[in-house]
Amino acid sequence: MRVTPFSCGTALVLLVAYPVAELVALVEMTVRHGPAFTLLWVLAAAAAGFVVLRLEGQDVAAFNAVRVALRRGEPPEVPLFATLLRTAGAVLLIIPGPLSDAIGVLLVFRPIARFIARRFASGPGSLAPSGPPGPGAGPRPPTIEGEVIGRRYVDEAAAAGNGAGGGGGLQAPPEKG
């Protein structure tokens, strides 16, 4: 992946703009609703985030979905990514601020997380098969059985005397090219 100055600049702007926007939204909430409401909001959202995070860690259904996908021969990226999104939503709830809370609440809901996961799973970087198989997916070359003695290869079939392989069983090592 090639990093261009534009992508670095965009990332820098987002890294600076997001916390500023979060702080502005938090101050606006405090001005409109008062400090008690804002403090209660932040504590309640953080508590909800910790609860969701704990439940997500104990979610057996996510592991079962991965196992079912693997048994079917399908890549398990949709259930894995949906679980990752729900976990990210819980972390966003823990981070104080109304913007992160809004995004976190959306990501915590399973249908929304599954929808986003399916959209990303069918994208260009997906593990899902799409198109003809790539290199190395074809039939494997035959295995040659024999024994290497020193730097010489012994063809077991020829050494046994059935004529296959010729040369009495000893051959020079193959040339590296």
Image (tube, rainbow, N blue to C red):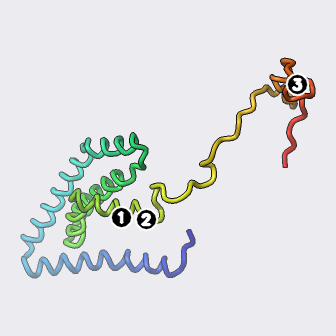
Residue at (16, 57) in percent of width and height:
48
Asked if 175 appears above or below 18 in the picture, the reply is above
Q: Residue 78 location in percent, x, y? A: 35, 54
Residue at (15, 65) in percent of width and height:
42
Mark 3 or mark 2, which is nearer the start of the sequence? 2
Quarter of the image holding residue 145? top right
User: 92 and 28: which one is in front?
Assistant: 92
The answer to whether the residue labelled 1 contacts the one labelled 2, judged by CB atoms less than 8 Å apart, is yes
Mark 1 or mark 3, which is nearer the start of the sequence? 1
Q: Quadrant of the N terminus?
A: bottom right
Q: Amino acid at mark 3?
A: Gly
Q: Residues within 10 Å of mark 3 (few under 14, many from 20)?
A: some
Q: Residue 149 location in percent, x, y? A: 84, 25
Q: Amino acid at mark 2?
A: Gly
The label number, if any, that marks residue 119 in the structure image: 1
User: 134 and 111: which one is in front?
Assistant: 134
Q: Is residue 88 left or right of residue 109?
A: right
